[in-house]
């Protein structure tokens, strides 16, 4: 019998970039900051903010810093406590459609570097909503993922899906799911973004081969051209850039614009 983790939402941040991003976007999550004596002066400008938040700061040796950071760390690390990620609901997809928000779904990612690459690409191109499947949720608390993301993870809005296949089936009329696959689908033409009138986009990023159950829930499946194939962390920035260039649906809609054109044409040529 395994003993449950007494702090399941405990997250360790390594490096100054991750610490400052947390201080900017989620300051209340900070609990403790540890730094080496050589790096401690770099934290001086933020001492007042730490005192106001009640964050404990410690100067430690290299060995203790590595133990606290749960891995390689040479300057500073921080202990944070995060709330539970909310479960995505069917109604959320309706809200995202109305706000024309593009979401990214990560399923089965196992490498922290892949999740970090996804976070950096999303932050770079203005995408904020990241939906994690049950197989990827634990990776979102891996210190290496947040370290490699260099603060980009803090800019994202994280949610989780307990049963991703069932959820996508329920929302198929609300969003268009575009899947990335290493070996299936059409080759992406970066000059021609995918078009989905009247719905918003959801990009499904699998950690390996696309799950057959999820494949049935996708409307478009794409793979990148080129041989040998790129790794997932190399592919993600290109795909996110391509997805971000997709034209957003206009608020008046296709039929409303068509009626407006007909009304204008009939009014411009009045009957004699």
Image: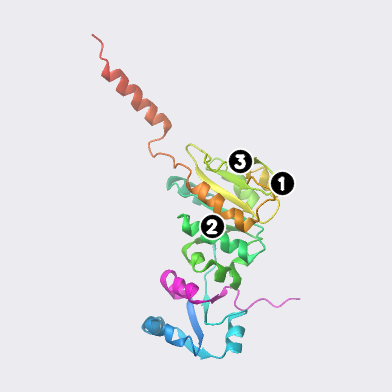
Residue located beneath label 3 in the image: 220
Distance CA(mark 1)–CA(mark 3): 14 Å
129 lies above or below 190: below
Which label sits in the foreground, 3 or 2?
3
Which label sits in the foreground, 1 or 3?
3
Which quadrant, please, contains the C terminus?
top left
Residue located beneath label 1 in the image: 212
- For mark 2, give the secondary structure: strand
Q: Residue furthest right?
A: 1
Residue located beneath label 2 in the image: 130
Mark 3 or 2 closer to N-term? 2
Residue 222 covered by magenta stretch = no
Distance CA(mark 3)–CA(mark 2): 19 Å
Q: Mark 3: give few (<14), some (14-19) or many (20+) Cα within 10 Å.
A: some
One can see residue 162 in this view: no
One can see residue 231 in this view: yes
**Count of residue discs:** 3
- For mark 1, give the secondary structure: helix
């Amino acid at each position: 019998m395994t003993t449950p983790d007494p702090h399941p939402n405990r997250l360790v941040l390594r490096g100054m970039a991750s610490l400052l991003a947390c201080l900017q976007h989620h300051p209340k999550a900070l609990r403790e900051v540890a730094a080496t004596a050589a790096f401690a002066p770099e934290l001086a400008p933020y001492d007042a903010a730490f005192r106001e938040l009640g964050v404990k700061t410690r100067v430690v040796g290299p060995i203790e810093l590595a133990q606290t950071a749960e891995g390689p760390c040479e300057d500073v690390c921080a202990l944070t406590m995060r709330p539970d990620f909310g479960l995505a609901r069917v109604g959320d997809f309706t809200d995202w459609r109305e706000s024309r928000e593009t979401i990214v779904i990560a399923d089965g990612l196992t490498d922290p570097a892949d999740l970090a690459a996804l976070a950096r690409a999303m932050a770079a191109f203005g995408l904020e909503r990241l939906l994690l499947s049950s197989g990827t949720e634990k990776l979102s608390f891996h210190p290496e993922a947040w370290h490699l993301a260099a603060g980009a993870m803090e800019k994202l809005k994280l949610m989780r899906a307990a049963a991703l296949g069932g959820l996508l089936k329920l929302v198929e009329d609300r969003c268009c799911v575009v899947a990335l696959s290493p070996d299936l689908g059409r080759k992406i033409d970066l000059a021609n973004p995918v078009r989905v009138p009247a719905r918003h986009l959801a990009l499904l990023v699998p950690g390996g081969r696309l799950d057959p159950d999820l494949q049935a829930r996708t409307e478009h499946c794409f793979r990148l051209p080129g041989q040998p194939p790129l790794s997932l962390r190399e592919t993600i920035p290109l795909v996110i850039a391509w997805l971000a260039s997709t034209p957003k649906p206009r608020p008046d809609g296709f039929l409303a614009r068509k009626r407006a054109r007909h009304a204008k044409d009939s009014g411009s040529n009045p009957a004699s």
